Image: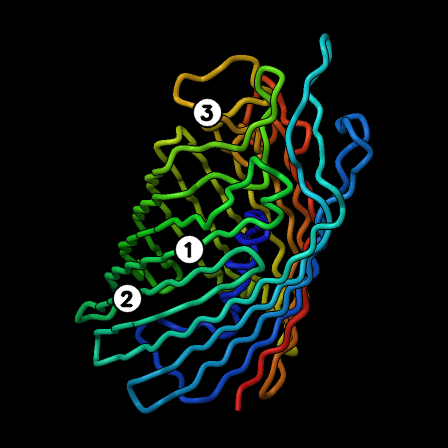
Amino acid sequence: MNNNALLALSTAAACLPALQAKAQQITQDFQLGVRHYNYQESAVPVENVLNQQYERYDIEVNQFRLVAPLGDNTQLNVDFQHEKMSGASPWYTFQLPGEAPKQVMSGASIEDTRRDLSASLKIALDRDVLTLGAARSSEDDYESQSFSVGYAKESDDRLTTWAFSADVSNDDINPVDAEIYRTRPASEQSKHSNSYLASYARIMNKHWLLKIALGLSRKSGYLSDPYKQVFVEGALIGDARPDKRISRTLAVQNRYFFDDVNAALHVDYRFYDDDWDIRSNTLDLAWYQNWDFGIQIVPSVRLYEQSAAFFYETFHTEVRADGNYSTDYRLSEYGAVTYGLKITKAFENWALMLSGEKYTSGGGHFLADADSEHPALLDFTLISVGVDFTF
């Protein structure tokens, strides 16, 4: 089953920044990018665990991207990602009288492999760009297929770009060991997603680029986590979430270049809201410092906070009329801080990249102010090394 924390990271990482170009630009060269990631979750504090399992996930990720020109106006992008994960994950919480809730962890024998293949075709005609894409992802218990379409148009003065994209995905879930753990569905489950994104980008002046984007997403079907359980009135039941979820996003990106120091400041903000009552704020700050000999150093910090889902509790003490229950830390109120550093060295036809991130979360981080902090909030480190070739 997908690990959401890593999924978000790996999706962002899959962009392989060194290979990105303007929306209207078709590459004239073949480009190949390779990334290797090592992701390690910190152990849950001993005092927060009820059983004797503290260790969490270790994940190795390999990514490959090929960008190929198919003519003056057409470009093919192909991405492949392979993840191998092992370890344990939070299972359910339990509260003893007079004590704070504690986490019960799964066994450390969880192993899974995820493969993701995607391709997109970009066709540029003067100031118009059409992009068509398809992707397939598979795990031991999870299959996903998605399709996307995008359109972008530049203004006559080429200072403004309007863009719109849409995608649809269909996922099939077949939880393992359902015959042993009766809270897991015994038959195949499915979910469906549709998302839409509209954006406006403007070159404000020779130093400043501004982009604003609005997003809408709708999910339906089986949205629960089959591997989570909830302790309610003396019995363990399966994690149960609403079968629909509608979310909205507003994102603002600023890029400002400083001539005198040959550097750029990136300031990004994202607001998220959904009908599960989760609202989040994300602030990204990064400084892209260019040096001699093709060296670029990028320190960054990301601040995040979210509210809790309406059906979440650190430990459920009452029966809910709607039948929805979850003690998943990802649905709790919490904040997080991520510190990052990336170093890139460019050579004539290739570039080398090394980066690291340190993520910590807590009930009081950033703007969060949780009444009861989840005992298994996530901390992790992410180290990556990559090479980009042009030929």
Q: Image check: 209 left or right of 289?
A: left
Q: Is residue 206 above or below residue 124?
A: above
Neighbourhood count class around disc 2 (C-alpha, 10 Å): few under 14, some 14–19, many 20 upward = some
User: What's the colour scheme?
Assistant: rainbow
Q: Secondary structure at mark 3?
A: loop
Residue topped by disc 1:
171
Indicate left or right for 27 with 132 as reference. Answer: right
Q: Residue at x 58, y 79 (%)?
A: 388
Measured from the top left, where is residue 188 in percent x and y? Answer: 45, 50
Q: Amino acid at mark 1?
A: Asp
Mark 1 residue element: strand
How far apart are labels 3 and 2 at the CA level?
34 Å
Q: Position of residue 113 (x, y in %)?
A: 63, 62
The three-letter code of the residue at mark 2 reads Val
Residue under the point 36% across and 65% down: 206
The residue sitting at the left extreme is 156
Q: Is residue 135 above or below residue 59?
A: below
Is disc 3 surrounded by few (<14), some (14 to 19) or many (20+) residues within 10 Å? many
Amino acid at pointer 3: Phe
Q: Which residue is mark 2?
A: 149
